[in-house]
Amino acid sequence: MDLELRGRHVLVTGGSKGIGLACAQAFGREGARLTLVARDAAAMDAAVRQLADAGVDAQGWCADLREAAAAEDVVARAWDERGPLDVLVNCAGAARRTPFAELSAQAWHDAMAAKFFAYVHVMGPVVQRMGAAGRGAIVNVVGAGGKVASPTHLPGGSANAALMLASAGMAAAYGPRGVRVNVVNPGLTRTERLQEGLAAEARLQQTSAEQVLAAHEQRLPLRRLAEAGEIADAVVFLASARASYISGAVVAMDGAVTPMVV
């Protein structure tokens, strides 16, 4: 199946590790040109080297996307130096998981800054430029916590829910201008961030992270966590020409652990 991504310019935020890096690798295998953005310079250098060793045309820049000006500068630089963007994948930022009894007002503000604004600060200028160009695809990797409330992920889940609404709204607003916007909601996925969430749940339940993980795996109908590459495969498809009539969709990737129809 030809996804028609060869030579396309793809911007991946949070592209230095985890699901973001898996997305970069998957787009690279399709022949796309990649611009990666993340905060950790060492992780970014390692990611770009890994992609270059695989023959992928990739550049990596460091920026704190919680700052609107920094995000706008990254978008402008990517567009001017690397060419118009065909695809944006937002995967940067993650809200810290905190048991509800430990929440403070600052925790709520931090969650919105880390997840909601880190995405919106990039999506805003990108969708405007794509709309002016008459084409483009945006895939926001959000999270299942935006649909099902968790006592250890209330601020982050709230940010995720807001992102889903913003994404659906952008899809409706910019569809007439040739831009598609979709959401992928991973459930538990084997990434570097997994351990933090397990530790928060362990504190709440007064047990060990290993026991929490075992309990999660037992509840999953597929009896295993997702791999980052599996999430990336869905992202790449949604960004491709083969998904040309899919827009405003929220795709659950939680292994059917939450059986729902909306």
Image (cartoon, rainbow, N blue to C red):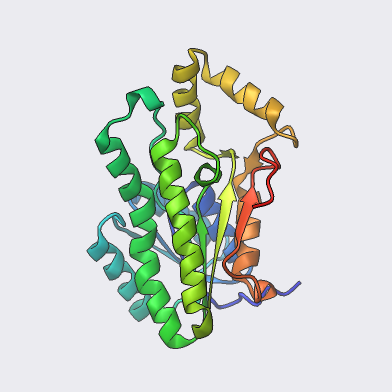
Report the residue at 68% width, 46% height from top: 260
On the rendered structure, is 50 left or right of 260?
left
Q: Give the x, y percent position of residue 228.
A: 59, 47
Report the residue at 28% width, 43% height from top: 109
Task: Kindly indicate the quadrant of the structure image that contains residue 223.
Answer: top right
Q: Nearer the viewer, residue 175 or 140?
A: 175
Location of the N terminus by quadrant is bottom right
Q: Nearer the viewer, residue 173 or 33?
A: 173
Report the residue at 51% width, 71% height from top: 171
Report the residue at 59% width, 70% height from top: 247
Q: Give the x, y percent position of residue 166.
A: 44, 62
Q: Nearer the viewer, residue 250 or 123?
A: 250
Q: From this viewpoint, which residue is outermost toward the front?
A: 262
Q: Give the x, y percent position of residue 257.
A: 68, 37
Above or below — where is 206 with respect to 171? above
The answer, for residue 244, to whether it is visible in the render is yes
Q: Give the x, y percent position of residue 123.
A: 40, 67
Across the whole image, how many numbered discs are drawn on residues?
0
Q: From this viewpoint, which residue is outermost toward the bottom?
A: 133
